[in-house]
Amino acid sequence: MQKMLVLMVMILTMLIAGIAVAATFTDNKNGTVLDSATGLMWQQGEPGSLTWTDALSYCNGLSLGGNSDWRLPNITELESITDDGKYNPAIDTTYFPNVHASVYWSSTTDANDANYAWNVYFFLGSVHHNPKSFSYFVRCVRGGQ
């Protein structure tokens, strides 16, 4: 019982201190990566930079790894693949080797301004919001929701 309590306190301390528990990725060797911590499958590469509307269309039309149910990730999903212990880029480059230390779109519209959407800046892993008319990178996801 005491060991369990100590373990729980350690985990809680790590979370409060902002230390991320690393995701467990698997390279499916077909252009996709599975995150067993979330059950999400990620596009390993990306098509380049697109506007938010074009990013939505691209992901919805993507056929990859034998699947065609791809979508643009929401902000929580996109941030889940950041690695707080890394920067430039703040992601595991073993599984995402050609990632840009730049901004990637999420599907989440800013509730205060429908012309803006939330995104992750993978240089630091930080979350921002920018006009949907800007062009940023895209990484599609499937599963979840």
Image: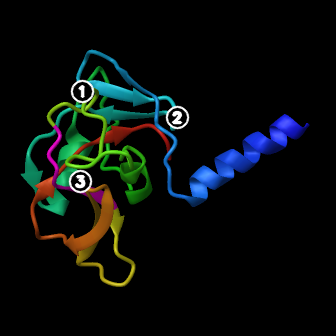
- Find the distance from the CA under tag 1 to the CA under tag 3: 16 Å
> Extreme bottom residue here?
112
Name the kind of residue labelled 2 in the image: Ala
Q: Residue at x 42, y 47 (%)?
A: 80
Q: Residue at x 29, y 26 (%)?
A: 32
Name the kind of residue labelled 1 in the image: Leu
Quarter location, residue 35:
top left
User: Relative to residue 135, is residue 12 depicted above or below?
Assistant: above
Q: Which residues are magenta?
A: 99-107
- Find the distance from the CA under tag 2 to the CA under tag 3: 25 Å
Q: Check contact, mark 1 vs mark 3: CB within 8 A.
A: no
Q: Residues within 10 Å of mark 3 (few under 14, many from 20)?
A: many
User: Relative to residue 32, is residue 134 depicted above or below?
Assistant: below
Left or right of 55 in this view: 66:
right
- Give the mark, 1 or 3, whose residue is nearer the N terminus: 3
Q: Residues within 10 Å of mark 2 (few under 14, many from 20)?
A: few
Residue 137 or residue 11, whichever sits in front: 11
| Helix, strand or loop at mark 2 | loop
User: What residue would you read off at disc 1?
Assistant: 64
| Residue 37: mark | 2
Disc 2 or disc 3, which is closer to the eye?
2
> Extreme right residue here?
1
> Extreme top residue here?
29
The x, y position of residue 69, in whole percent, is 34, 36
- Give the mark, 1 or 2, whose residue is nearer the N terminus: 2
The x, y position of residue 105, in whole percent, is 24, 57
| Residue 56: mark | 3
| Helix, strand or loop at mark 1 | loop
The x, y position of residue 59, in whole percent, is 24, 44
- Find the distance from the CA under tag 1 to the CA under tag 2: 21 Å
